[in-house]
Amino acid sequence: MTAVDVVQFEIAGTRYALDIQLAQEIVEMMPITPVPKAPPHIAGIINLRGEITNILNLNRLMELPEGGDSESKKIIVLVADAVGGSKIGMIVDDVKSVLQISDEDVDKMDTSFSKEAYIKGIIKISNEQDSDKKDLVIWIDIGGILKNTLSEEGVKTEQHLQ
């Protein structure tokens, strides 16, 4: 039985998680400079302690409704090596906690319904109000999502140049 640490966050009222080793840091929301003609899921860029960081809007990237109180929004900055060397941050509605999960806490997802369902599994955690109930947290494969997104944009760029 293997234990894994994940960061639990919320987008549009649903709980998600990603592997903690992919998260470099979590920062408070700050002004984002829009980038002209960027894809809709690119919110813009920020200057994070002297380094330009690309900011993704996960709601748009995962085709979810916009949501959440702007005061609780955070940016999860990803480890550059985990995302092809780029400095990338993701806007989330709120960061909830760090969880340590084991194999028995995770149900594998049937991916036959969508080839682009980059879900590692569904994490079952105890409900805060009722310990007999389990809350579900969607464990996303952010590396897979970003790899697919960047390759699609590369294809679009190549097609545009021809």
Image (spheres, rainbow, N blue to C red):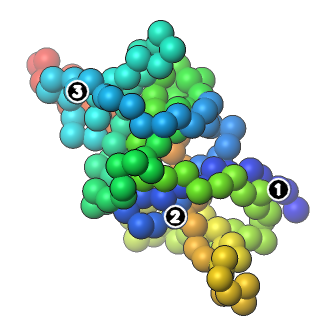
* Circle number at residue 3: 1
Task: Classify 118 as above or below 123.
Answer: above
Q: Residue at x 48, y 58 (%)?
A: 10
Q: Quadrant of the N terminus?
A: bottom right
- Judge the density around disc 2: few (<14), some (14-19), many (≥20) Cα neighbours within 10 Å: some
Under mark 2, the amino acid is Arg
* Circle number at residue 71: none
Q: Residue at x 29, y 49 (%)?
A: 60
Where residue 109 appears, as percent x and y from the top left, is 56, 69
Task: Classify 162 as above or below 110.
Answer: above
Under mark 3, the amino acid is Pro
Where residue 105 appears, as percent x and y from the top left, is 74, 70
Evaluate whether residue 90 shows in this view: no
Q: How many marks?
A: 3
**Alpha carbons under labels 2 and 1: distance apart:** 20 Å
Judging by the rendered image, the residue that carries numbered circle 3 is 34
Mark in front: 3 vs 1 = 3
